Every structure is written in structure tokens, then in C-alpha cells.
Amino acid sequence: MLYVFKVVSYNPNLILNNICLFNISESLYQEIKLKNQTFEDIAPSWANKIKLLQQEGFPFPLSLAWWKWYFELDSPSKCIVGEAHGFSSQYEKECKKCDELGWEFGHSFLVRSMKELQGNMEKFVKHWNEKHI
């Protein structure tokens, strides 16, 4: 016996095939294709923080705001890459490239380079879309 179901998704990041075929004697097969995600999709809270940073500039070195940024970027679960991985530090063991990019984000902040920060964001988005979707 063959049943035909229409698949509906309210998640804008998912593009589902319109029809899913289900054979009682076999498993359900469904092809899901994810569109490329933006930095805002991957790490929304950090995207907002970086927009603010772009508007206001880097905090004064060693100020309270500077230390807050520093410790968040230095904490694997709280940093940009950590947010993308569900505020987890597990990526340090599972993905060498994510670990490297996490350190690069921190370095960009320490040297106060918006250009380097933007470049790291682009590299991270490219990596995320290639390896983690």
C-alpha cells in the first residue's frame, strides 16, 4: 500500500520537496535542502552585538565594556562559534576549523580590526554552510 503526504514547513531555512512518498513496508524518505545561512541566521545575538560595534566602534581598551567583550569572545561556549553550536564548547573537539575561527574572532577584537572581523565572519559563514548544514 502506498500513501502520499504533502509536507509543510514553517521554517524559512528549510526547503522541502512538495510530496513525500511513504510505503508501509519501507522507511520514510524525505529530502531536505537547507538554503545558505547568513551570519544573522547562524549567530543572531552576536550579529546584533557586531552591528552595534560597527556603529559605535570598539570599546576603550581595558574598560568594563572591553573586558565583557573579551571574556565572551574567550569563552568557547559564549563566543560567536559557541552560539552557532548551541552555546556549547563541544565544537572545540569536533571541528578544528570552528576552533580556529573562534580564536581568530578573539584576535580581531584584540587588534581592534573591523576589517579582520568582517573577514572572519565571511570565512565562518562559508565554513558553516559547507560543513555544518
Image (cartoon, rainbow, N blue to C red):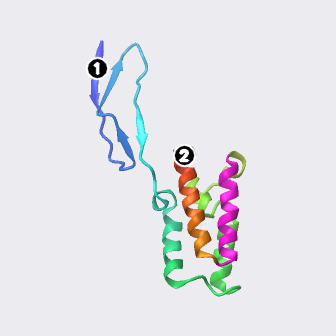
Q: Earlier in the sequence, mark 2 or mark 1?
A: 1
Q: Is residue 26 above or below residue 133?
A: above
Residue 86 in the figure: left or right of residue 48: right
> Mark 2 or 1, which is nearer the eye?
2
From this view, report whether residue 107 is shown above or below residue 21: below
Q: Dot 2 corresponds to which residue? A: 130
Place of residue 8 in the rendered image (x, y in percent of width and height, measured from the top left): 30, 39
Instruction: Determine if the magenta segment contains residue 100.
Output: yes
Q: Position of residue 14 (x, y in %)?
A: 38, 44
Q: Position of residue 126 (x, y in %)?
A: 54, 53
- Residue linked to disc 1: 3
Residue 35 shows in the view:
yes
Q: In percent of the image, x 55 and y 51: which residue is there?
A: 128
Does the stretch in magenta take in 126? Answer: no
Q: Which residue is located at x 66 percent, y 71 percent?
A: 108
Q: Secondary structure at mark 1?
A: strand
Please state which amino acid type lies under the numbered disc 2: Glu
Q: Is residue 109 above or below residue 99?
A: below
Query: Residue, x 27% and y 23% (percent of image)?
Result: 4
Return the x and y of residue 132 as percentages of the image width and height.
56, 46
Quadrant of res 58: bottom right
- The residue located at (58%, 65%) in the rendering is 119
Q: Amino acid at mark 1?
A: Tyr
The stretch of residues the image draws in magenta is 95-112
